[in-house]
Image: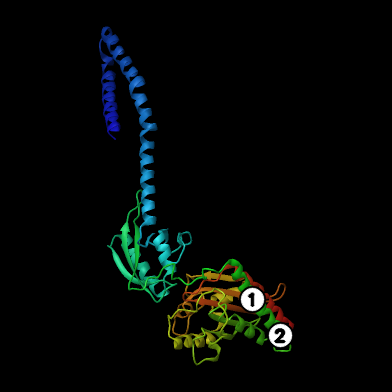
Amino acid sequence: MAETDEFGEELADFVRRVAELKSARSVPADELPTVLDAAIFELDHVADQLWPRFQQLSSDGPSGIASTDRQEQQLLKALFQRVPVPVALVDRETVVRRLNFAAASFTGVRAGYATGRPLTGFLAHADRAAFRSQAAAVARGDGDRSLTVHLQQQPSAPVRATLTALRPSGEPRSAVLVVLQPADSRVPSGANTPGPAPNLTETTRHTVLMDLVDAMTTTLLSASGEDRSTVPERAAGVLHGRFADWVVVDTGAARLSRTTVLGPSDAPGLADASGPSGTPALSDAQGPSEVQRPSAYAEVVAALAAQDPAACPLVVEAARGGSTALQVRPEDPDVFGRDTSGDPFLVRANVTSLLCVPLTSAAGPVRGVLTLFRSGGRLAFSMAEAQAMDMMSRHIALAMARLN
């Protein structure tokens, strides 16, 4: 920096001397050789002194500064990633720009998956609007904020989120630094997030999935002689509990009608609210977490049974387009419609992932729509499970056509 200042001062002096030489053009002709000698001296000074120094500063100075800046940025990135406190950097729309290792373990979400997605998508539906509003206020410069939220994967453990404004270097707008910490003694972490047992392998998961396909095939082949309306009902019984917490069946060609709704198995007092027991969960996780009272589940089952499928955008789209829909942590809570009181069904059922598959064969019409929900801390539906469900849906449609 000192060399640059010194070069600037010398260059300014040179410019002043050139201006003086220009004003000397009006001197008498017998004195012009002296002025010409001074001009040649200044040109030599530029060629021999100023230009080499300028090249040196251009090649060495800026790259050296840039190298130093890069080293500083790498150091800051390493510190951000390794700091033992869960920290996320988001913009004013809560879109995640960076998520450190501690935050990934705390939330149970991989940093690569979270980057570019709204942080509100990993929170319980009831907390999203408040968090988004507070993040916008912090980004505007209204001061630091703190609020209690709940992670969608661990809704029973409150989390304290502290938000502060941060202006990244070279950027026109402020970002928001979010620090997450448990609001009580229960600490949600990657180790506590429900997931596969340590000894399970992909081969085991594939075997469990094939067991489900086998159970579905056996059920469909044994449905001969029955009314075709019982086929999707029996298929729902196979899927309920071991594959999904919620199973909703809509049948019909010209107009869909809701025929079956199965809710979590701990909902008492309702026949359709219990499924097969003693079957291993395909996701190798426990059932839904204790977000609602068992009686509340029964209320949701009854409300879903009374819903008109035409008021459910996801079902209408599946019946119209004939394609499978897989959503993990659905961003739009209204995608499955609302109950009579105006509450979204996905929020009431604490849905964390869903599968919506049309019941159609290769060349036949859509005979219905099958929708599956997983809730609480259960693992989300995977692409492999979606592909298996797509195959089973075609088998269900074929069984329905055979009994037509």
Going by the numbered disc 1, the residue's amino acid type is Asp
Left or right: 401 in relation to 54: right
State which mark lies toward you, 1 or 2: 1
Residue 284 screen position, x and y as percent = 54, 74
> Mark 1 falls on what kind of element?
helix
Q: Crowding at label 2, few (<14), some or many (≥20) Cα neighbours within 10 Å?
A: few
Q: Is residue 171 above or below residue 164?
A: above
Tell me whether the residue at label 1 lies in contact with that at label 2, contact meaning CB atoms closer than 8 angstroms: no
Q: Which residue shows up at 40% across the image and 75% down it?
A: 126
Q: Quadrant of residue 248?
A: bottom right
Q: Nearer the viewer, residue 250 or 102?
A: 102
Q: Earlier in the sequence, mark 1 or mark 2?
A: 1
Q: Is residue 67 above or below residue 210?
A: above
> Mark 2 falls on what kind of element?
loop
Q: Is residue 273 above or below residue 85?
A: below
Residue 330 screen position, x and y as percent = 49, 71
Q: Nearer the viewer, residue 307 or 194?
A: 194
Q: Is residue 379 visible?
A: yes
Q: Which residue is mark 2?
A: 222
Task: Name, please, the residue furthest toward the front.
Answer: 199
Q: Which residue is mark 1?
A: 211
Residue 106 screen position, x and y as percent = 40, 66
In the rendered image, which quarter contains the C terminus?
Answer: bottom right
Residue 358 screen position, x and y as percent = 63, 75
Q: Nearer the viewer, residue 252 or 230?
A: 230
Task: Name, please, the residue furthest toward the top.
Answer: 30
Q: Is residue 256 visible?
A: no
Total labels drawn: 2
Q: Is residue 15 above or below residue 348?
A: above
Q: Quadrant of residue 127?
A: bottom left
Going by the numbered disc 2, the residue's amino acid type is Ser
